[in-house]
Each structure stands twice: as structure tokens, then as C-alpha cells.
Image (cartoon, rainbow, N blue to C red):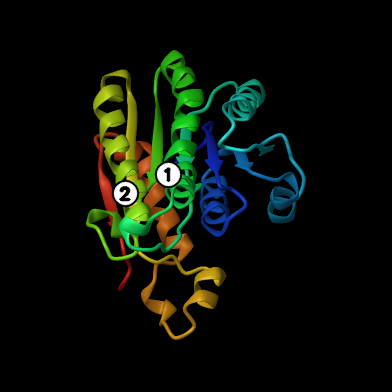
Amino acid sequence: MDFANKTVLITGAAGNLGAAVAELLSARGARLALLDLRRDGLVQRYGQATDRRLLLPANLLQPAEVQEAVVAAQQQFGRIDVLCNLAGGFRMGPPVHETQDRDWDFLMDINVRTLLNMVRAVVPGMLSSGGGSIVNVGAQSALRGAAHMGAYTASKGAVIRLTESMAAELREQNIRVNCVLPSIIDTPENRAAMPEADPTRWVAPHDLAQAIAFLASDAACAVHGVALPVSGLS
């Protein structure tokens, strides 16, 4: 899993998973384009930009901001070889029949529209440069519906279906598209929300990053459209 001379764009880069992926891929030689909503979050996590690390504040729900960030990455590094779509979110909800438009729209926006805006901006450059790899983040819970999670599982289920569709559309152009399906990720936020749970059974961000790195790398050159469960012991 060598990323020397490759440029990786990571969304949600200021988060726990984003930092784990960035650390791993940087150690393997990647140049990093790190995208998150606010520059201060990126600076707090990574320090200042360097010739191999670009900080890109952008609202992923605003196509113009996404396009501007992608162009900045292409101008600095020449091309984007890997896109890691890590941005997303979770929210429990009411029963499906009580779901409000604002709750549905929130989860569809943060989990699906962000992905659409990113691939719209990145894929044309990958096609022009001769290929690339895209890794999305679904959820293990999206494999079937669950009470009070209708909107969430629907949004993450859409991520899986879009991954499969893109893989079918782009594989002949040397662009691989896959996704990971984590269970509960061991983050400070999840520990605070579930203090009675055993976090040793969850998925550590570093371990999930290893799976993402594999799918992003040339080691997975024959892998297209996979939805890979990464569940730890949970």
C-alpha cells in the first residue's frame, strides 16, 4: 500500500477518522489535500499547510466551494489520485411516519449530497488523468432497516448503491469505487454518548483507516464496487 507520488483528497479531514487516514497515508508517502468545513479545525489538527499538505476549508453542500477546493488541490499537486469521502453524520430519529422533512434532509444532505458534490468535482479530473480510486463510508447498519434509524439507514444505504453504480460506470476508465461499512467507531464523542458500552469492541479509527487505505491503494486493483464491513467485535 504505497502512496508515494500520489495525491489523496480527504473530506471530513478534521475529524477522528479523517486524521487517522491522513496520518496513515502520509506515512506511506501521499501528498494530502485536507478538506473540512472550517480552516481553524484543520489548523488545530494539522498545523499550517506545507508543500505536501494543503488545507481546504469548504462547505460540501455548496458545489461552488467544493469545485474551488478541488481546483486548488489540482493546481498545487497536478492531479487527484484518491478521493476518500469520509464526511458524514449520524442522528437517531422518530418512527418513519413521524419523520420531519428537516430530519430527512439533514441526513440525506450530510451523507449523500456531500458525496455527490465531491464526485461531480473530482471524477472529471480522474477521467482526464487516466484513473483513480474513490473510497466512500457507508455503515454496517445500512444493510437493513432499524427502528428509529429510517432516515439514517436510508442515507447510508444510498451511499452503498451509489458506490456500486459508480463502480459499474467507471471501472472501464480505470477508476475504482468502493466503500467501507463500519459499525461503531471508537471516538471520544461515541464514548461520551454511550458511557455504559465497551469501546474495546468497537472499531478503532486507525483500524478503519487500514481498510480504507487498502481499498484506495493499488493492492486493491481488482476490487470494484465492494461494500466492506469493518465491525471489530461489535
Which is more toward the observer, 150 or 51?
150
Measured Cα–Cα span from mark 2 to mark 1: 8 Å
Q: In the rendered view, tell whether residue 196 sits above or below residue 95.
A: below
What residue appears at the point 49 percent right and 32 percent down from the top-left corner?
A: 118
Residue lying furthest bottom in this view? 196
Classify residue 59 as left or right of residue 194: right
Classify residue 184 as left or right of residue 106: left
Disc marking residue 154: 2
Q: In which quarter of the image is the C terminus?
A: bottom left
Q: In the rendered view, tell whether residue 3 sits above or below residue 170.
A: below
Pointer 2 and pointer 1: residues touching (CB < 8 Å)?
Answer: yes
What residue appears at the point 43 percent right and 52 percent down from the top-left corner?
A: 100
Q: What element carries label 1?
A: helix
Instruction: Report which quarter residue 142 is drawn in.
Output: bottom left
Q: Can residue 19 be seen in this view?
A: yes
Q: In which quarter of the image is the N terminus?
A: top left
Image location (x, y in percent) of residue 44: 74, 55
Q: Can residue 86 be seen in this view?
A: no
What residue appears at the point 42 percent right and 47 percent down from the top-left corner?
A: 213
Disc marking residue 130: none
Image location (x, y in percent) of residue 225: 25, 37
Q: In the rendered view, tell whether residue 192 sits above or below residue 11.
A: below
> Within 10 Å of the Cα at label 2, are there few (<14), some (14-19), or many (20+) other Cα atoms?
many
Image location (x, y in percent) of residue 127: 41, 17
Which is more toward the observer, 102 or 79?
102
Q: What element carries label 2?
A: helix
Disc marking residue 108: 1
Residue type marked 1: Met
Which is more toward the observer, 207 or 93?
93
> Within 10 Å of the Cα at label 1, are there few (<14), some (14-19), or many (20+) other Cα atoms?
many
